[in-house]
Image (cartoon, rainbow, N blue to C red):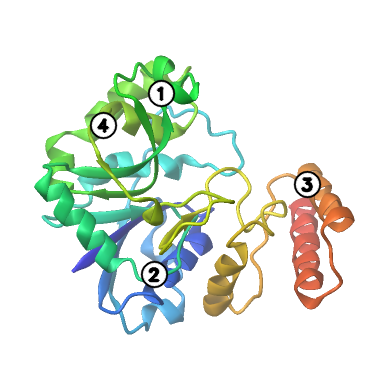
Amino acid sequence: MYQFLYCFDQNYVKQAFTSIISILENVDQNIKFDIITNLSENEIRVPKKIKNHNYLDSISFHKINISNIDLYNLSEAHVTEATFYRLFLQDYIINENFITYLDCDVICLSNPLSAIDKVYKQMISEKKHVSFNTEINRGDGYKYFDDLSLEGDKYFNAGVMIFNPIEWKNLNVKDKALNLIPKIKEKAIFWDQDILNIIFDNNYFELPDELNSRSREKEITNLIFHHFSGKHKPWTIKGFDQKYSLDFHQFYKYIYRSRYLITTSNFKNGSKHLGSYLSKKFKFDLKNIIFVYHAIRSLIKKVLN
């Protein structure tokens, strides 16, 4: 049975369930989900549309606590300690089957199962235990390779990952990560992604673009997973009108009955982005009026809190 893994804290609960329903609405057979979180199961309210879905086999919650670990670069508004949770997955996920990990800012736009199955088989054939989609090549002029002492010529995006949990444990990714965190914290930019690039340096199967698309311009044939990488997510004021944002909000509305999820972590920046939207992109229609209403509500909540 196909199995998917998410990692989140209280900041990404609704985003994660929006991603989960997008998968359930596109598959044609039962699937399982595992969730690593710092929340107790009683603190998590699984939407009824997910709990009662025909293709949901199970959701298993695994509680984690890494508050004693000195992490880095958590001042970014869209990143919390949960981005590091998967580094510790070997303590919670023991399975002989391949698992697909997804960031909470990934949505599913078509049935992923046959494409995932194809990757599984190719990974077994090539004796690879993990699969990522390359984001940067050494020749592109970025300094990550030298900063992270990478020997290979590729740096991958880790928002979608297919992996073998048994081999992950055999590689002892957790202890390697704990050893790396204090060594690279002054140089690292992309959190756990940098750590994984060091551990799996030039030793991973290439995940096809349709399973981790991050492009806002390039059209990808048979697109399956779109990843809203970067700061401006579809639930932020600035990211609301980017490509595929409305798909995210349609799935959100399906399970939460509210048209838009709009949040802001900074009143000043949120106000600035809303002002820019109103002056440059606003059109007098229902979609935009409702968006502005939710955006203003999020700003008011920020002030009151």
Q: Nearer the viewer, mark 1 or mark 3?
A: 1
Q: Which amino acid does label 3 sit on?
A: Phe
> Residue 93: x percent and y percent?
21, 52
Verify CB contact (< 8 Å) between mark 3 and mark 4.
no
**Can see residue 89?**
yes
The answer to whether residue 303 is left or right of residue 28 is: right
Q: Which mark is residue 218?
A: none
**Residue 138's mark?**
1
Above or below residue 53? Residue 23 is above
Ranked by sequence position, the earlier of labels 2 and 4 is: 2
Q: x, y percentage for residue 195?
A: 35, 29
Residue carrying label 2? 23
Instruction: Quote the CA–CA distance across marks 1 and 3.
Output: 38 Å
Q: Which of marks 3 and 4 is nearer the N terminus?
A: 4
- Residue 166 position, x and y percent, is 12, 46
Tell me the quadrant of the picture where the N terminus can be found.
Answer: bottom left
Q: Where is residue 123 in the image (x, y as percent from the top left)?
A: 17, 48
Mark 2 or 3, which is nearer the eye?
Answer: 2
Q: Distance between the residues labelled 2 and 3?
A: 33 Å
| Mark 4: amino acid | Phe
Discs 4, 1 touching: Cβ within 8 Å = no
The residue that label 3 is drawn on is 267
Query: Considering depth in this image, is 186 or 245 the residue closer to the camera?
Result: 245
Q: Earlier in the sequence, mark 2 or mark 3?
A: 2
